[in-house]
Amino acid sequence: MKVLVVDDEPLIRRSLRRAFELATHEVYEAADGIEGLKIWQDTDPDLVVLDVLMPGLTGPQVLNKMDEKKIRAKVILISAYSGEYDLKRVQNMGADLFVPKPFTNVFDFVKMALSLMQSQNPISFEVE
Amino acid sequence: MNNESFFGLSSLIRPKKEILWIGADSEIPERSLGSILSQIKFSNFKSIHKHIMKSEYRAIVVSILIEKDMDVNIIQNALKGVSVRPIEKILILKGQGDLPLPNDLLLSVGEVDFAQTVCLPAADSDLQAVLKRAVERQSNKLEELNQQRQASKEIGQLTDQMRSLDSDLQSRNQNMQESKLAIEAKISNMRALVRFVKDLTEVVSVEDLMKQLRDDCKRFHRLKEPVLAFANNQNQLQLMYFQGSQVIAKVIPGAWPQQIRIRLNDQKDSQFLANLFGRPFGKLLTLPLNLKRKGREEVLKVAAVLFFEHSLEKDEMDQFLKFIEARHHLISMTLDRMLLETDLNEGSLLWERTFDGILDPVAIFDSQNQIIRANKSFADLLGSASSDQLQLQSLILNGKQYQVQSYPISFGSESLHTHIINHYVDVTAANRLQRQMVQSEKMAALGHLAGHIAHELNNPLTGIRASAQILVSQKDLDSTLHSDLVEVERAAERCQVIIKNLIDFSSGGIENKTAWTTFNEIVQKTLPLLKTLINRYEVQVEMSPAPGEVMVEPYLMQQVVFNVINNAAQAMGEAGHLEIKTFIDPSDPGWSQLVVKDSGMGIPEEIRGQIFESFFTTKSKGQGTGLGLSISKTIIDRFNGKIEVQSQMGVGTQFTIKLPNRSVEV
């Protein structure tokens, strides 16, 4: 499956790529919101791991834009600022999950992301 | 010349004839004597006396015929008493020839002091001459008599004058005597007054004044000792009276009669005194005193009164009135002086008390920087300061810091400033508070900053940890690489824990996850994090079998314990002995205690007090921020705990953390 990682921290992108690639998924990266938006549109991934606080567009702003375009994917919001988000809010924003940084274990994170991808909408399941 | 037609005897007109011829007119010498003669016959002798008395005769001639006119009694009677004024009496005896005169006749006639006796016949000229001589003699006699009378009168006058002079002199003497006495009395009075004045100048209290007054009035035996009353204020009197030889003072409420004149036996006064003393009062002299000091209220007309009870009689009373009036003003003045002095002293005392009541040290300096006056606080707190120190704007003495506020003043009539008042304000607490505030603010800013930093750090840290996890999961790593990577991952995890705590701590406890826990639990959770750090030391851990329950945020306390143990490790360097103990001191059961003791180099005494201050560090730049202990202390304070340090150079350091025990409700 296709995964897009949008985060301004290179080591996060790199380590997530590694982790997802170990689980044999295709990983795309974007370093900021604008680039992320473009690549999302271009590659139509199944899962987007979206950082909240980024230069350019923030995570929620990206979601907004994607929502307008009616492009759907599973979205996990990640952020160091955990206090302000609860599930409802997250879902209102158009995301499916919120995971605070730092992750306790990157492999657990990947497992969780995969089960999220498999949980609904088999239509979005595409084998590339 | 008819005698009867000459003058009517009833006529009151005095004849102006000089000679009275008593006898027949035929014998009268002729010439010129007619003009001076009156004539009267014997038969009219009865009225002769009266007639003679009324006349101004100088001479009386009685012509007697021996035979015929023998009734000499009549002559005698007529001529008797004529000697009131000089009248020459001439007796003419007629006889026939030279008849010898009967002796009886002569004798009896001689009782009337005839000046001359002429025997007839005699020549006319002889008669004339006799008469003339008689008249002359009478004139002379009259003259003499008048002179005598005059002299006598003069003598009388002189005598009278002398008498009056005498009495004058006497009265003058008396006056002088009286004046002398009066003057002596006056002098004596003046002396007494002067003595009184002198005595009054030495009076130092109202009691003294009363005693002086009493002594001075002693001469008036029927005068009792004076009673004095003066106003403290409109509604309160100070009463002073004698009991034996003592003066008693009493404060009583009330007012007194407000008349300003000196008065005797005033009913209101007697009533007033009777009410005060509970006994009737006899005769009274009331002497209102005129004071400049009118008590606190200006409403009183009379500010002080003297009462004299007495049994003086009227003239003694007059004397006494004079006496007391002479002294009236003096007494008023002296009482005034006493009361004003008291007021002044009270005022002065009040100021002194105020001055000394000020808890801040205050001192007054002259232009030579010498202390003129200082209050009690100054003596107590700054007495040991040197004069140089005292001139500073701020000074530190005996562990207290003073800020000096200076105010220039001028004493005396100078308009320039002559002195300076220095007010030493103890700003120790204020400074400490300020430092604490600054520290708080620093801490708040720091916390804020820390929050940001923490979030910033989280990003790369997430990456580091994730990467480390991925690397660790690689197969075919040699064992060293593998274990290294494990350590890296653990380090990253520790960082995340620290950062998380930092975020929690700096967010001010939004998530107030306090819970009952024990030091044992906290230590047990923290030690694993330090395993690599402390396994090079000899570690002794003593966990109390009955640790007390404490209410804390466990994560934060873990941080504190981590920090303290970390410090201990840094103090010891490569090797040493570390002791960690939890316990409750039975003599201090309100506290749960944790002790971390190291065998490091120790903390020097000078800095021991500062180690809990933010940014205090002995490590060189870049090695430590000095945050650890100050944050630890803040955390401990937040949970109402204490942290103490004991240290000995070259031996080691011991940190003791105390937290309030959960009180067991019995």
Image: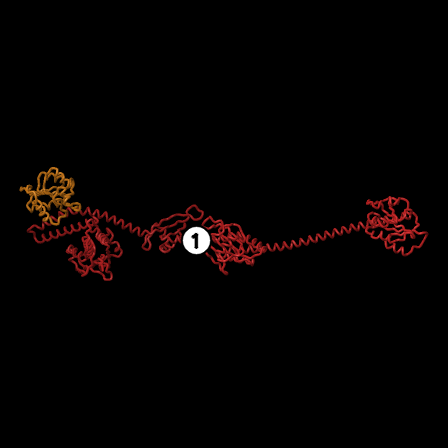
Chain colours: A orange, B red
Label 1 neighbour load within 10 Å: few <14, some 14-19, many 20+: few
The residue depicted at 24 percent of the width and 60 percent of the height is: B588
| Residue B542 image position (x, y, % from top left) | 18, 60
Q: Quadrant of residue B534?
A: bottom left
Seen in the image, is B591 located left or right of residue B298? left
Subunit that carries the residue with mark 1: B
Seen in the image, is A108 located left or right of residue B54? left
- Element at label 1: helix
Q: Quadrant of the C terminus of chain A?
A: top left
| Residue B216 image position (x, y, % from top left) | 54, 57
For this orientation, the residue located farthest to the right is B97
| Residue B553 image position (x, y, % from top left) | 19, 53
Q: Amino acid at mark 1?
A: Glu
For this orientation, the residue located farthest to the left is A127
Q: Identify residue for label 1.
A: B346
Residue in the foreground of this view, choosing between B362 and A62: A62
| Residue B289 image position (x, y, % from top left) | 51, 52
Residue in the foreground of this view, choosing between A77 and A51: A77
